[in-house]
Each structure stands twice: as structure tokens, then as C-alpha cells.
């Protein structure tokens, strides 16, 4: 049984129950008020457990997540946060753990794919182990903010890129901001302009206008007008201005279009109209103004003279009266004029006095108040002169193109402006490649100094002539130049002639003359010396047999030198008169091999090896073997002597068409190019004790064999003698005479 309370205890217990009931009532009222606040809060309120799951949500939270309360309870908040990077979530959790509360922004993604931008504030362990989260949808606010940023960016972009000047200024006219176009108009940097005001640039005559514009924009909020601003350099710029108030942080904005050029054009146009009237009246060319039907409405005095009619009669006529309108060219010109609106051409016009004039004209459709303008020029005399010039030019071109010598024209800067086919042939180049090229570039770089000297002389004296020698593709070329400074104003002329062959023929002719002189001299000397020589040799031999002792060495030297003199006399006689020889078919390879065998002992003594390389199946050559051996011995001996330290001599024999080519190459010191031409001349030699007769005789023998000797040499590398002999000997006229 329950123990009953005593009356006293019952009396004491009654007030405690009443207190508890009162406290319970107050708690219920507070809970009800909290519940009302929880449910009616405009912000979403979410209670989460430690796993981040919804324990309770208010009505605003249901609207935020667009789900029923029943569906939200037990769902994890993380299922809405897939757009938030994991590192951001980890950072926010660490901040909550560290401080117990945290505020930030998040993106949530609803099940239907909608994305919302929210602000949230979370407090840890508000209800024992439950966390309280307050959320607010700021998507619209963020969208407005983005739009504001975009608008501000667009304004700034337009501000900076605008072609017209834009100025932000205060109520007193001081510059707050200016765009690049305005800075450029005043030719001042933005930084300098921001310390200045409109009043410092407004032209004096526009001061009242600016005051009016400023007052009007303050009163009405907008104003328009024109202003002239004076730049620091004194130049005036004219602007059309539209001002608006309170468009940018409470300041005023003015859009200023630079109309300086337009205003200047208007002024110029007005002056042009005045000038046009003066030109119209005083012009030397005929000017007609006519309508669509061809009737002349106005004409200047020059037109009266051109069309051989007084002005009062000319303005009554029709333009088509002066042309043969049935002519196809006339129809085509006026048809093209109607289509294009303008045309330039010329026609034959028939004057009332019977005269025919060739008139060049320019027509412009609707040029003056809708009427057509035509300007005429009498070109009758000009066309006659042009025909005569054209005929003269054709004659000149014919002479220019068919001249035997090269003709080249250049301008004041020595650039080629024309060249005839002979010039193109001399330098083996197309005419198009020559045009525009500098004159000195015609020849290789090494020869340009010579040509430059001729050009300088021509510049000084008005004309010059000379020869330029150069090597082209390994062959020597000699071009004869003749220059004249100005055949016509600004145009110089150059005559060119390739004289390489002529120079070679002159050289051969000089050699031939020298050979003839030397031959005649040799004949006389040989006959005068040979008889005393015979006596000297005989008596020396007799004297040698009768004297004993140590004098034998002297006799040997005397006999050796006498034999040397005798050999020189023999070579003289070869030059003096060709030997009576009989040409027969002979194996050139055998002749060369016999020569090599003959001279091999001397080659071995000088540590020289002769390498023979003969092409197989070479045909026999008409020649005199002994004379060819003499040539080969002379060249091989020279090759051995130029290699004192030994080396290789290569002898090649090949066929080249109707010729046989013998090439003898040594490894000596080489011969300079300027000395190669002198080889074969009498008494010219590169050896200390040489006479030059050996090569001279060799050239003579090869010439008698209807061949030729060519020399290639490079200093420090070696020399090659090329001997070319015909396989079939051609009979000459002088041979027939002999």
C-alpha cells in the first residue's frame, strides 16, 4: 500500500505541485512559440544527426529542396552536394569541428537536376547530438549580381572600345573618367585628363554654349549640342555632344562624336561649290550638263569653242546631234553609261561647220542635281602625234630587237628597264628575269668592280666604253661594253658585244704571226749556227782524243752543251718549216704507251708514277706518231719536273664524239690563270732554264694535226693538259695547194 501523507505533509506538497504545473505550462507555451517560429521561419531550418541525415525540417526547407517533409526525413544532406568539390566539403567540416559553428555558401542539386545557390549557417550540437542548419536560397540574388557584373563589364568594354569619346564628369565639369577615344581626340593621356575639366578645353566662342548644356542636363537630365575643344597643341576639334545625368554613380556622362572632319568637309564643300562655278566658267575643257534625253541644259565657254557654236545656241541642242547614234560603238558607250552610271572613252564628234573632232570625255550620271555631267577634251592632235610616235616606236622596237649587238636600257638608279634578245642570249637568261635587276648584277661578283668603274665614268663624263673579263661556268668570257648616260631623260643605254671568240682569234693570230716571225728568224739562225757548230763538234772530238789527263770532264760538259744547242736548233727548224710528214692511221694508245715506256726511267728517278687509263675500243687516229711522241714527251717531262718531291701523273684517253681526248694530269704546284693564256708563246716558260720552245713546238704540232690543246690548272693542286685530236683528218685548202 502506498504510504499516506500526514496532513502537514499534504499541506506542504500542494504548493510544489502547483509550481510544477505552472512550470510545465510555461514550458509548453515556450515550446509552442518555438514550434511556430520553426515552422513559419522564412529561412530553411534543418536539424541533422551526426551522419548528416535530416531529422527535422521546416516548411521553408521543404520549399527549398522542393520535397515533402516525409521524403526529406532520413535523407542524407550529401546527396544534394554532388556539385561541391570534396576538398571544399572537407574544409567546411574541419571549420565546424574547430569552431563549433560555420557560415558559407554551397551549390545544391535537386533530384530533378535543378541547381540552387544557398547561403547556410550551421551550429554543432544545438540539440544534444543534433546540428542546426539555417539555409537561404540566394540563387536569384546571385543571378542579379552576375547580371550586374556582366552589365558593368559590358559597359566598361563599350566604354573602352567606343569609337566616340565618352566622358564621365561632375556637376562642375571636372573629368571623373574618360575613354581612350576621347583621350586620343585631345591627344592627352587619361592620367593627365583626370586632373582637368571641360572648361580648360572649351573654345572661347563656345563658353556660353557649354554653360547652357550644363544647366540643361542638370534641369532636364539630358542635353544635346555642339562644342569646340582646343587641344594643347592649339588645334581645334569639333564635337557633337549628348549629355545624360545620374547614369554612373550619380555623375554625368557625355558621348562626344568627333565631327571635325565632317565640319571641315562642309566648309570645303561650300568653298568647292564656289570653286566649281569658277572652274566651270574658266576651264579649258568643254563641260556640258544634260538631261536623260540628251538635251544640253548648261555649257561653259570652252564647250562653245569646242562645239563651234555660241553658248545660247549650244544649250538648245541635243548631245546626240553631234554623234552618229547608229554607230555600234556609240550605242555601246551610252548603254554602258546607263548601266554603270559613269564612263570614260572617246568618240568622233561631228561639228556644225562640218569639222570632225576626236574628243575624249568623262561622263558622270546624275552628278549635278540629277543631271548628267560630261567633260570633253579635244585629242585630235594628240592622237595624230600618238600615231606618229607609235610608228616611230615600232621602228625603234624593230631595230632594238633585231640589232646584231646587245642593247640594254637602264633608269637613273641603274636598274634594267629593257633588254633586247641579244643581251638575253649573251647572259643566257629570260628577259623577265633581267627587268628590275641592277646593271652590275649582269656579271659575276668578281667582275662587278670593272663594270662599276665604267658606270661611274659614264656618270661623270656622260659616256664610257671598255671590256669586262670574267669566268662563266668555268670558261673565260670577254664582254665589250659601250655606255651612254642619257639617250632620253632618265634613261641610259648600254651596247654589249661578246668578243670572247674574236679575242681568242686575235690571240691565235698573234701567236701565228709570232710563230711565223720566230720561224723565219729560226731558219736564219739555224743555218748560220749549224755550220760553225758542225766544225766545233768535229774539232772538239779531235782535240778530245789528243789530250789526256783530267780535262775529259771539261770535254763532256762542252759536248753536252753543244748537244743542247743542237737540240734547240732542231726545234727552231720545226718551227721554221713543218716537216714533211705522212699521216697514217695509228693506234693512239700504243703511241702513248711507247712514250710512257720511254720516259718511265726518268719518272722513277724523280719518284713519279705514271698511271695509264685508256678507254677500250678506241678507233685509230690519222697522225704522225713521232711528232705526237715529241708532244707527249714535252708534256710528260714538264709534269715530272714540276713534282720534285714525286707524285702521280694520270694519263687518260677517251673518245668524245668524232675526237679522241688525251688528258695528262700532274700533282704539281699549278699555274695561275693569268699565265695559262701565255703558254705556247715563244720564250715564255715557268722553268728557270727553259726556253719555252718545247710547248711552242707542241702547240704547232697539234695545230698541224687539226687538234687543240687546252689547259686547266689550280694553284697548289695541279695541272691538266687536254689534247683533242680528230679521228678523221679533214683536208684543208692550203693542204691541197701544197
Image: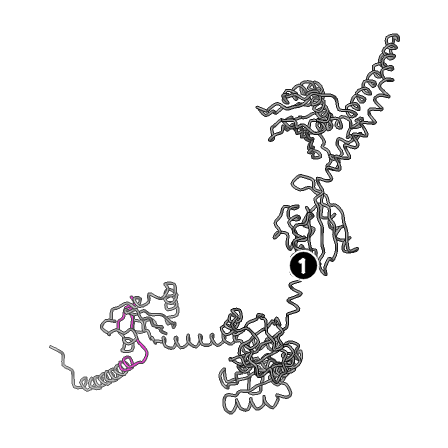
Can you say whether 636 is above or below 99 in the image? above
Residue 73 is left or right of residue 106, and the answer is left
Asked if residue 64 shows in the view, the reply is: yes
Seen from the viewer's position, the closer of residues 179 and 9 is 179
Residue 190 is left or right of residue 445, and the answer is left
Magenta span includes 245 = no
Q: Residue at x 86, y 8 (%)?
A: 545
Q: Residue furthest front?
A: 354
Seen from the viewer's position, the closer of residues 534 and 344 is 344
Give the image location of residue 652, x and y in percent. 63, 27
Q: Residue furthest left?
A: 1
Name the residue beneath numbered marker 1: 392
Give the image location of residue 660, x and y in percent. 63, 28
Q: Which residues are magenta?
A: 34-55
Q: Quadrant of residue 561?
A: top right
Q: Residue at x 35, y 73 (%)?
A: 118
Seen from the viewer's position, the closer of residues 132 and 399 is 399
Residue 294 is left or right of residue 458, and the answer is left
Secondary structure beneath dot 1 equals helix
Give the image location of residue 664, x and y in percent. 67, 27
Asked if residue 120 shows in the view, the reply is: no
Amino acid at each position: 500500500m502506498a504510504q499516506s501523507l500526514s496532513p502537514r505533509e499534504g499541506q506542504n506538497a500542494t504548493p510544489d505541485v502547483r509550481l510544477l504545473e505552472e512550470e510545465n505550462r510555461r514550458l509548453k507555451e515556450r515550446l509552442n512559440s518555438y514550434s511556430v517560429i520553426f515552422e513559419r521561419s522564412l529561412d530553411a531550418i534543418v536539424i541533422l544527426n551526426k551522419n548528416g541525415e535530416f531529422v527535422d525540417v521546416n516548411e521553408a526547407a521543404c520549399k527549398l529542396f522542393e520535397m515533402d517533409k516525409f521524403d526529406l526525413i532520413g535523407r542524407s544532406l550529401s546527396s544534394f552536394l554532388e556539385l561541391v568539390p570534396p576538398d571544399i566539403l572537407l574544409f567546411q567540416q574541419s571549420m565546424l569541428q574547430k569552431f563549433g559553428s560555420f557560415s558559407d555558401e554551397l551549390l545544391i542539386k535537386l533530384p530533378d537536376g535543378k541547381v540552387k545557390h544557398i547561403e547556410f549557417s550551421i551550429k554543432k550540437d544545438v540539440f544534444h547530438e543534433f546540428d542546426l542548419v539555417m539555409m537561404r536560397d540566394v540563387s536569384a540574388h546571385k543571378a542579379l549580381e552576375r547580371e550586374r557584373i556582366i552589365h558593368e563589364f559590358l559597359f566598361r568594354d563599350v566604354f573602352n572600345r567606343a569609337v566616340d569619346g565618352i566622358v564621365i564628369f561632375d556637376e562642375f565639369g571636372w573629368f571623373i573618367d574618360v575613354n581612350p577615344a576621347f583621350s586620343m581626340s585631345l591627344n592627352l593621356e587619361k592620367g593627365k585628363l583626370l586632373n582637368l575639366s571641360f572648361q580648360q578645353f572649351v573654345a572661347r566662342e563656345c563658353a556660353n554654349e557649354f554653360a547652357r548644356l550644363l544647366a540643361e542636363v542638370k534641369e532636364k537630365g539630358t542635353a544635346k549640342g555642339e562644342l569646340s575643344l582646343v587641344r594643347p597643341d592649339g588645334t581645334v576639334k569639333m564635337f557633337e555632344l549628348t549629355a545624360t545625368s545620374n547614369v554612373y554613380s550619380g555623375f554625368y556622362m557625355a558621348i562626344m562624336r568627333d565631327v571635325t572632319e565632317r565640319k571641315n568637309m562642309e566648309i570645303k564643300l561650300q568653298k568647292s561649290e564656289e570653286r566649281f562655278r569658277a572652274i566651270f566658267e574658266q576651264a579649258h575643257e568643254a563641260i556640258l550638263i544634260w538631261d536623260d534625253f540628251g538635251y544640253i541644259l548648261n555649257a561653259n565657254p570652252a564647250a562653245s569653242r569646242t562645239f563651234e557654236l555660241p553658248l545660247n545656241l549650244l544649250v538648245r541642242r541635243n548631245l546626240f546631234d553631234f554623234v552618229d547614234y547608229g554607230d555600234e560603238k556609240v550605242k555601246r558607250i551610252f548603254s554602258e553609261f546607263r548601266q554603270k552610271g559613269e564612263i570614260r572613252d572617246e568618240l568622233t564628234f561631228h561639228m556644225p561647220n562640218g569639222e570632225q573632232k576626236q574628243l575624249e570625255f568623262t561622263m558622270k550620271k546624275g552628278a549635278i542635281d540629277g543631271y548628267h555631267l560630261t567633260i570633253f577634251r579635244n585629242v585630235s592632235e594628240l592622237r595624230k602625234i600618238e600615231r606618229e610616235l607609235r610608228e616611230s616606236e615600232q621602228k625603234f622596237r624593230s631595230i632594238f630587237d633585231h640589232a646584231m649587238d646587245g642593247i640594254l636600257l637602264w633608269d637613273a638608279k641603274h636598274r634594267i628597264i629593257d633588254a633586247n634578245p641579244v643581251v638575253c642570249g649573251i647572259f643566257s637568261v629570260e628577259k623577265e628575269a633581267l627587268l628590275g635587276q641592277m646593271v652590275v648584277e649582269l656579271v659575276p661578283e668578281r667582275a662587278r668592280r670593272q663594270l662599276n668603274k665604267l658606270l661611274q665614268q659614264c656618270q661623270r663624263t656622260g659616256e664610257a666604253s671598255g671590256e669586262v673579263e670574267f669566268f662563266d661556268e668555268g670558261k673565260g668570257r670577254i664582254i665589250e661594253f659601250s655606255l651612254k648616260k642619257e639617250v632620253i631623260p632618265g634613261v641610259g643605254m648600254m651596247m654589249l658585244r661578246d668578243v670572247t671568240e674574236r679575242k681568242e682569234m686575235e690571240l691565235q693570230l698573234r701567236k701565228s704571226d709570232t710563230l711565223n716571225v720566230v720561224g723565219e728568224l729560226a731558219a736564219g739562225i739555224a743555218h748560220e749556227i749549224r755550220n760553225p757548230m758542225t766544225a766545233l763538234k768535229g774539232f772538239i772530238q779531235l782535240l778530245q782524243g789528243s789530250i789526256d789527263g783530267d780535262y775529259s770532264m771539261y770535254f763532256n760538259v762542252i759536248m753536252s752543251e753543244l748537244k743542247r744547242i743542237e737540240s734547240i736548233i732542231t726545234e727552231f727548224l720545226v718551227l721554221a718549216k713543218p716537216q714533211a710528214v705522212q699521216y697514217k692511221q695509228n693506234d693512239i694508245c700504243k703511241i702513248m704507251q711507247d712514250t710512257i715506256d720511254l720516259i718511265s726511267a726518268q719518272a722513277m728517278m724523280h719518284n713519279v708514277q705514271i698511271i695509264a687509263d685508256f678507254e677500250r675500243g678506241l678507233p685509230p687516229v690519222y697522225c704522225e706518231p713521232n711528232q705526237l711522241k715529241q708532244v707527249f714527251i714535252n708534256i710528260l717531262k714538264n709534269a715530272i719536273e714540276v713534282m720534285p718531291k714525286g707524285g702521280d701523273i694520270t694519263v687518260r684517253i677517251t673518245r668524245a664524239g668524232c675526237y679522241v681526248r688525251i688528258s695528262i694530269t700532274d700533282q704539281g704546284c699549278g699555274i695561275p690563270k693569268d699565265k695559262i693564256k701565255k703558254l705556247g708563246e715563244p720564250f715564255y716558260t715557268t722553268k728557270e732554264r727553259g726556253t719555252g720552245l718545247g710547248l711552242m713546238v707542241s702547240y704547232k704540232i697539234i695545230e698541224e694535226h687539226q687538234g687543240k690543246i687546252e689547259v686547266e690548272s689550280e694553284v697548289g693542286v695541279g695541272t691538266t693538259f687536254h689534247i683533242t685530236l680528230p679521228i678523221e683528218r679533214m683536208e684543208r685548202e692550203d693542204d691541197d695547194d701544197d
